[in-house]
Amino acid sequence: MTLSIAQKLIAAFVGLTLLVLIATLGLARWSFEQGFLDYVNALEQTRLEQVQNDLAAAYEAAGNSWSSVTEQRFAGLVYRSTPREPFGGPPPADRVGEAPPPPARGPRPQGPGAPPTALYDVTGSLVVGERVGTGDTKTIRVPIMVDGQAVGELRSAPRRQITSPLETEFSRQQLRTSWLLGVSSLVLAIAVSLVLARGLLAPIRRMIDSVARLSSGDYAHRMNESRGDELGQLTKDLDRLGSTLEANQSSRKRLLADISHELRTPLTVLAGEIEALKDGVREFNARQLDSLDQEVQRLSHLIDDLYQLSISDVGGLRYQFATVNIADCLQQAIDRMRDRAAAQGIDLSLQLPEVDASRSGMAVTADINRIEQLLLNLLENSLAYTDAPGKINVGLSRTATMAVVSIDDTPPTVRDSDCEALFDPLFRGEASRSRRTGGAGLGLAICRNIATAHGGSIVAAPSALGGLGIRIELPLAGRDGE
């Protein structure tokens, strides 16, 4: 049988309480019995100290001799010093001595349950009384002093267990009180454990319900807990998870809608032109063939971009990292794009640090093919969205740990609020930088994935030249951990 969390909490709490109670009550009971016996033996010590004064006087009166201390006299002296209640039973009728005890006042100390008491002389010989074991280290001993010298010794056997009815009843009363306290504590522990279990399980049940709703697709559900403990932190994390899943779901739906739109456009154009050719509305010639080819190329380019984006999102792009000089990569990319830029009336320039003319110190750990893809995509984007005559400035600098590539172009620009969204797949900006060239808006998304895979970052902002500025940071080789 599998126990629930509530049952486990209650069992653990009650079990721990029970163990503590058993240990505490057991120790308290043992301590009580030992302490009570010590108390009784302390009373016996006090009793013997009272008797020794009378015995010392009798010793002096007899000329420093114990001859006057008979069994009867000794019994009377001991009896008068003995508390009445702890010892039960009447005194023997045949015991008659000096100052005999009245029958109504209680038993002799040598009666049932009374500790044996004896008088020994200075040599250790028994004078009167019941012999007490001399080898017991716990024997109660009281020396009898006369003129500062010991003339004898009173001995009494220590009590080792509770025997009298009153003592037994008192012990039982204490035991009943302990049991009552133990049972009350156990009941209280069960009640407290129930309250604690309910208090702890209430948010857990709400979290279980929240997870179930998230798993069923209800990403808008929020718990909105205000607890300040670990459970409160967990509920906040679940709410953030719901927000993330909701945003991802919305992004996925928007992406699917945008992809459908992007695919529909060239397909619609192709279908329309083919239908026109079939109906004879248009004459099939080289011009129409070129138009069809352009739409096919556009569709092929879009599908290829979607494929590149999908594999870069899931980490499917293969990277072969090596030490690469980013300045050389930039120079090669600029050389490949310079003629196209000139043909479009765009001035494409590269500024390298003057203090680093040899281009040393610009080494990064990267896949050279992916870095070239990143740089060419960014330059393609700038050429596509820069009005002629225009200008594109490419710069290279470094910080303590990063190589920094900047690409700034002339108008048109984008709104500040759209800069972050430029890296979202299929993002449509304002009309001034819309997809005039037939691009699908996937290039910058691929660039971000490549930069992230290299441990770097890429951001966009309005350029000082009036257009768009792109800043890429890549970790310098050997400086990642600094």
Image (tube, helix red, strand yellow):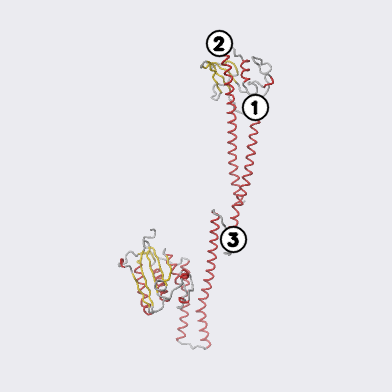
Q: Secondary structure at mark 2?
A: loop
Q: Earlier in the sequence, mark 1 or mark 2?
A: 2
Kindly report which numbered mark, 1 or 3, lies closer to the viewer in this rendering: 1
Return the residue found at the far top: 63
Q: Up-down: is 13 above or below 366? A: above
Q: Earlier in the sequence, mark 1 or mark 3?
A: 1
Residue 85 visible in the shown view: yes
For label 1, the crowd category at 10 Å Cα-Cα, with few meaning under 14, some 14 to 19 and many 20 or more, is: some
In the rendered image, which quarter contains the C terminus?
bottom left
Residue for point 40% across, 67% down: 472
Q: Secondary structure at mark 1?
A: loop
Mark 3 lies on residue: 212
Q: Earlier in the sequence, mark 2 or mark 3?
A: 2
Q: Quadrant of residue 347?
A: bottom left
Mark 1 lies on residue: 164
- Whether residues under marks 2 and 3 lie with C-beta atoms below 8 angstroms apart, the answer is no
Mark 2 lies on residue: 63
